[in-house]
């Protein structure tokens, strides 16, 4: 018999774009993935099953191929979690608005990502799922938004069954990944320009010294 809660699952979306999802409630995130990829609602998902998906999309006019790996989320598979985290280009931290425990785990998994990757600027999107169950809400929108501000990431409340904001979540993470890539490229180009200036200055002073030595010998 399956328990009500399982440890967070990892989902990858690889480069092209590799996204990893961490979530706490049974079938919470697979339903979003199936809705994003297949445009249908998943009633049940076996948390011990590892599934792979591919989805092509045009995001902001640019093509993107999303390779998605939804990893098994039972406790016996947690040893693999850090291995998956090292590969992900971006992460979706997903909790249920009807489950405060899943929300509280979000901070734990953000810290885990930062520790595994040894940096704090990995692209992340925060998701509060099951917003169609407003009468069962345990986590307010303001709480989710405040945590996303703390993480420095976008925040969405979604409904897999209504397909509300499902595409927005994945598209937003691709934008975050692209933004980080552009930042890294700009920093690398800046560093290269700095190195080139230093090389030119060294070459200039070297030629100047050669000229001075030649002039002194001729005088």
Image: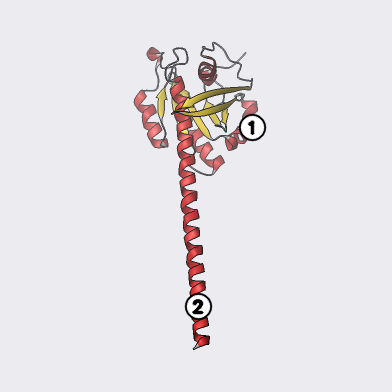
| Residue 152 place in picture, x, y as percent | 41, 37
Q: Which residue is drawn at 41% across and 31% down?
A: 154
Q: Camera-side residue: 193 or 145?
A: 193
The number of numbered discs placed on residues in the rendered structure image is 2
Extreme residue in the left direction? 142
Could you say whether the residue bearing mark 1 is in a helix, strand or loop? helix
Determine the CA span between mark 1 and mark 2. Answer: 64 Å
Q: Are marks 1 and 2 in contact (CB under 8 Å)?
A: no
Q: Give the mark nearest the N terminus, 1 or 2.
A: 1
| Residue 66 place in picture, x, y as percent | 55, 27
Could you say whether the residue bearing mark 2 is in a helix, strand or loop? helix
| Residue 105 place in picture, x, y as percent | 49, 29
| Residue 106 place in picture, x, y as percent | 47, 30
**Which of the 4 image quarters holds residue 99?**
top left
* Residue that badge 1 annotates: 80
**Which of the 4 image quarters holds residue 7?**
top right
Q: Camera-side residue: 36 or 71?
A: 36
Q: Which of marks 1 and 2 is in front?
A: 2
Q: In which quarter of the image is the N terminus?
A: top right
Q: Which residue is drawn at 56% across and 34% down?
A: 88
10 Å crowding of disc 1: few (<14), some (14-19), many (20+):
few
Residue 134 lies, with reference to residue 216, above or below; the image says above
* Residue that badge 2 annotates: 211
- Residue 121 visible (yes or no): no
Q: Is residue 146 left or right of residue 66?
A: left
Residue 63 lies, with reference to residue 198, above or below; the image says above
């Amino acid at each position: 018999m399956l328990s009500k809660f399982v440890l967070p699952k990892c989902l990858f979306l690889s480069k092209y774009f590799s996204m990893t999802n961490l979530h706490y409630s049974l079938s919470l995130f697979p339903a979003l993935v199936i809705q994003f990829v297949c445009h249908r609602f998943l009633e049940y998902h076996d948390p011990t099953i590892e599934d792979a998906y591919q989805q092509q999309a045009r995001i902001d006019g640019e093509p993107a191929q999303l390779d998605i790996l939804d990893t098994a989320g039972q406790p016996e598979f947690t040893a693999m979690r850090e291995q998956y985290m090292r590969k992900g280009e971006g992460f979706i931290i997903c909790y249920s608005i009807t489950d405060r425990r899943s929300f509280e785990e979000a901070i734990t998994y953000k810290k885990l990502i930062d520790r595994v990757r040894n940096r704090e600027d990995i692209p992340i999107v925060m998701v509060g799922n099951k917003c169609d169950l407003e009468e069962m809400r345990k986590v307010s929108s303001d709480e989710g938004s405040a945590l996303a501000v703390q993480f420095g990431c976008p925040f969405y409340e979604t409904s897999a069954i209504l397909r509300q904001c499902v595409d927005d979540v994945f598209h937003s993470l691709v934008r975050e990944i692209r933004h980080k890539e552009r930042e890294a490229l700009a920093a690398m180009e800046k560093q290269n320009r700095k190195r080139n200036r230093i090389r030119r200055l060294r070459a200039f002073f070297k030629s100047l010294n050669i000229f001075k030595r030649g002039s002194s010998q001729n005088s």
